[in-house]
Structures are given as C-alpha cells and as structure tokens.
Amino acid sequence: MSDEHEDVSCESHGKQAPAVMCRHLLEGSRLGFNYSWDEAEPDVWCPDAWCDECDKVWTQAGSFTDEVKEQLDIKVVCAQCYEELRERNWLQDDARFEHLLQESIANLEDRQARLWDQFRIDECDEYRWDQDTGQLVFSQGGKPRVTADFVFVGTISTHSNTWLWSWANSTDAEARKALMRKVRAYGDEHRFMRLATAHWSGEERDGWQMTAIAAHLLGAAGAYRTPSDHGYNFLIMTCVNWVE
C-alpha cells in the first residue's frame, strides 16, 4: 500500500519512523490486524496493516481497486503508535498462547537443569560468543571447558523497555538468527502477536519467555542471557560439548 516516507512528527512520541494502516485501526479496537508481506523487505518492523473488514473487501475485489482504496482510507502514523494500535486490535487465542508459554517454560527449566548438571556451567567464571564461528565458549581459570553452538533469539532494551526479535535485528549475523524465522512463521500461523511481530514493549521477564518458546519450538539444548550496553542478549544453545 505504501511507498517510502520521511520520518513523521507525532504529538505523543516525537519524531519517529512512519507506518501505514487503514483508518479503522486508528479508531477502533479488536478489529483484527492484517499486514503485508514484502519479499524484498521480509524483516520490516511495521508492515502496512489493515483490519479484518478491509481484508474482506480487498479479498473480494482481488486487486487494489478504487473501492479498496476508499475502504482502507490509508493513514500514516508513527512506528510507536503503530505498535500500540496493533496490540489494541490484534485478535488471538490467549488461552492457547498461555498454554504454549507455560509448556515452554517448564520444558526449558528441565533442560537447563540437566545441562547445568551435566556440564557444570555454574563452575565457569567466563564466557564469550563469536558470531562468525557461532560458538559460545565457557571457561574456568582462563581455560575453555564447554562449547556450544548458539543462535540469537532477541534482545531486551532496558533503555526503551522493548523486545526485538533477532530476525529483525540488522546487527545480528544472518547465520546466527535464521532459525528464528521458524518461530515467527509459527506465530504467523497461530496468530500469536509476540511471536509474529518484530518489536514490542517488554522487559527481562518477556525476554526469558520468548527464549523459552524459541527453545521449545526449535528443540534447543538450553538457553543463555548475556548483558549488552543497554540491556540483554538472549540466545539458545543447540549442540553442547566438553572442550577436548
């Protein structure tokens, strides 16, 4: 629906990146939230969005006709308003999501306990990860003891109190985040907002919850959290071994 726009000035949030949605999403709540998919930019944070009623009209028309344009009544909003309006209008089965979450947390707690017991990671006093090699290394007394293949899940910013999935983070190497697109696809399929969308308000607890779900869906051996300049990086470990 949209072309590129310059930043917009929002009365509530100041200067922000622009986003595009139908008028009804601005005015209503629980109207359903549909969004575009651009193969050229699959990881965009705020894809063009429209409500369920607009989706019906568009589907029936079969193309972007004048009738569809009139129905959508496209508006430009700031990215932060977009995220707030998305949460207000998104429809999902909350009970199913809560079941997935609790199952994932229990699964990760069990795997973490077994992993820490087997490899005695709590005895290590140092760690380092390398995006190029995809290795997370735990050391004790300067000597590497345990290595693990890792994948970034996402980050929590304690500056903005937000979560960002790794698949939408341009600073993460593609090889270290590609698996997270399977989690996003699962979120798209089951209409779980926090899995399907790139960026939203969150804190450390949310980071652990998303990491637990990712670990559960991808069959990870365990998970880890490392500090960053303004928050935390969350990652999952896939193949863990003693250093020979």
Image: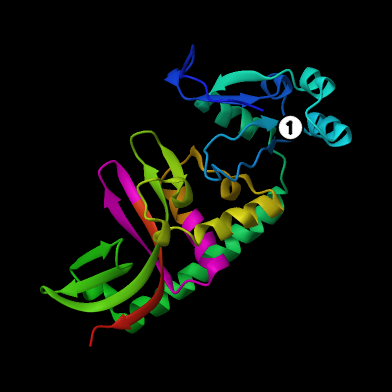
Q: Which residue is mark 1?
A: 30
Name the spot of residue 215 as percent of width and height, x first. Answer: 50, 66
Occupied quadrant, residue 135: bottom left
Q: Please tell me whether residue 220 is drawn above or below residue 72 in the rendered image.
A: below
Occupied quadrant, residue 101: bottom right
Mark 1: few, some, or many residues within 10 Å (few <14, many ≥20)?
some
Name the spot of residue 102 as percent of width and height, x first. Answer: 58, 61
Residue at the image position 63 percent from the left and 31 percent from the top: 48
Occupied quadrant, residue 53: top right
Q: Name the amino acid, label 1.
A: Arg
Is residue 216 at all visible to an observer of this figure? yes
Q: Quadrant of the C terminus?
A: bottom left
Q: Is residue 33 left or right of residue 78?
A: right
Residues 148 and 167: in front is 167
The stretch in magenta equals 210-232
Is residue 152 at all visible to an observer of this figure? no
Q: Is residue 132 left or right of residue 208?
A: left
Residue at the image position 62 percent from the left and 26 percent from the top: 2
Residue at the image position 32 percent from the left and 44 percent from the top: 231
Name the spot of residue 117 as percent of width and height, x first. Answer: 35, 81
Asked if the stretch drawn in magenta spans residue 228, the answer is: yes
Mark 1: secondary structure: loop
Asked if the stretch drawn in magenta spans residue 92, the answer is: no
Q: Is residue 201 left or right of residue 171?
A: right
Q: Residue furthest left?
A: 141
